[in-house]
Amino acid sequence: MPTIAIEDYLKCIYLEEQQGKKGLVPTGQIATALSVAPGTATAMVKTLSDSGLVHYEPYSGVQLSEAGRKLAVHVLRRHRLVELFLVQVIGMDWSEVHEDADRLEHAVSDRLIARIDEMLGHPTLDPHGDPIPTASGVVAESNHPNLVNCDLERPHQIARITDQAAEFLRLVERHGLRPGNRLSVLSRDEHADAVRLLSKDAGEVSLGFRAASKILVQPL
Amino acid sequence: MPTIAIEDYLKCIYLEEQQGKKGLVPTGQIATALSVAPGTATAMVKTLSDSGLVHYEPYSGVQLSEAGRKLAVHVLRRHRLVELFLVQVIGMDWSEVHEDADRLEHAVSDRLIARIDEMLGHPTLDPHGDPIPTASGVVAESNHPNLVNCDLERPHQIARITDQAAEFLRLVERHGLRPGNRLSVLSRDEHADAVRLLSKDAGEVSLGFRAASKILVQPL
DNA sequence: TTTGATTTTTTGATTACTCAAAATTATGAA
DNA sequence: TTCATAATTTTGAGTAATCAAAAAATCAAA
């Protein structure tokens, strides 16, 4: 039975593999993401490798094995279903469910997660627009543009927020940028590091490129 | 922040203090209840004592301190609210929620438990009839008779099942002895270790004294 | 290509929890 | 009261996860 730490590392490696497009995830990146010392991540990565959950290339990084990917996706499914459950059934705010889900994902049984999945009608997206993996481990990949590379002056609908940090989500919420809402990008200024947009909900808003790239949209 | 193990030990000591009427809970009893080696329980009890959560008398046993009791009751509140939630909201069977609750009780935040409490209308009893401690730590104590010492040939209502072991609850369920159901005790035979009863739901049933003592009732 | 900076790994320790088995203390029957 | 039995504690050891700091490897810039 995988420990909580192992589940956390696998989930982390999976998410880093998703965004950083390169092949291997360096141990330092894992350490930063999980807020542990570099040596700790190296040590853990070695035990993951010994268990056959990752392929580890010293001084280069790791990559999930098939077994590791399966486990990581299973954890991610629990996390995202729990998030949606907390919003839809418990009535919590979408911007504050992440921390709770981070702990519940290790405690919910398969039986319980199956009931939740059923109650919610086998949903495919969590409250942040992230895809919910199926019970068999399939993750629907979408390739929405983000606010940095989408068309200018064109109506879009917010599809997904790819950063769950509480402070970021609070900012996003404050500017009316929750998934589903409409907006269009007015202009971008690379040098000023600024993206100006018009939100149907909260009027004109300006974001840095870093923040803007975390908001995925769909042209209408 | 208390670890999961510490929460488990405190909850266990609390429950043992409740039923075994004597003052101190022996370490061996804790070891048995938690399925750990005797020496493990002794070691843990010492760290609990060092943290001021129990009063420990070597070779005699332990007793919760005020701080320990407070923490134990807090865990118990989470456990029982989660159990009721799983039955009422998720629709799980009352006889199978204990294991899930045993893990969720360490993962639900105060914020979440407050929402659950509100959703359920600030309930006072869990699905087994056990009292749910209040947020401030008050536990309503009741002293129902059980099937061994209640009046014979008198209609009673089942108030509480004081053993959450899955196999026991399945047996209880099979004989229609769920909380709320009606029954009367027909006869008892100390030598045969048998209590015969008439259940409104499932007809005549015979139980041993050990099992019968775990079922608490209320005269109608 | 050498070197200085960065990243990664190694080393040595620590905390939390656990076990098996030996040593100790308590208990109860003769 | 004594002694065998039962319960408890101690001892020695192991696993899992972590850190700080030293050592090694890699990378990039001159």
Image (cartoon, coloured by chain):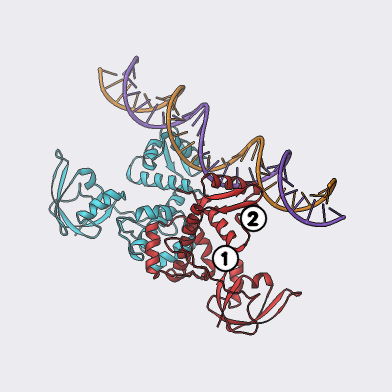
Chain colours: A red, B cyan, C orange, D purple
> Marks 2 and 1: CB-CB under 8 Å?
no
Q: Nearer the viewer, mark 2 or mark 1?
A: 2
The residue that mark 2 highlights is A29
> Along the horizontal axis of the image, is B18 left or right of B178?
right
Q: Give the SS element for disc 1.
A: loop
A213 or A105, which is in the foreground?
A213
Place of residue C14 in the rendered image (x, y in percent of width and height, measured from the top left): 61, 39
Mark 1 falls within which chain?
A
Q: Is residue D29 above or below residue B38?
A: below
Mark 2 falls within which chain?
A
The quarter of the displayed image where residue B12 is located: top left
Q: Label 1 is placed on what type of residue?
A: Gln
Q: Is residue A10 above or below residue D11?
A: below
Q: Give the SS element for disc 2.
A: helix
Place of residue B112 in the rendered image (x, y in percent of width and height, measured from the top left): 46, 63
Are the residues under marks 2 and 1 on the same chain? yes
A47 or A140, which is in the foreground?
A140
Residue at 23% of width from left, 52% of height from top?
A: B172
**Crowding near the residue tagged with mark 1, few <14, some 14–19, many ≥20 C-alpha atoms within 10 Å:** some
Place of residue B67 in the rendered image (x, y in percent of width and height, measured from the top left): 48, 48
Residue at 44% of width from left, 64% of height from top?
A: A134
Real-space CA distance between mark 2 and mark 1, rounded to the nearest whole angstrom: 17 Å
**Crowding near the residue tagged with mark 2, few <14, some 14–19, many ≥20 C-alpha atoms within 10 Å:** some
Residue B66 visible somewhere in the drawing: no
The residue that mark 1 highlights is A164
Residue A130 visible somewhere in the drawing: yes
B198 or A85, which is in the foreground?
A85
> Along the horizontal axis of the image, is A61 left or right of D30?
left
**Count of numbered circles in the view:** 2
Mark before the other along the chain sequence, 2 or 1: 2
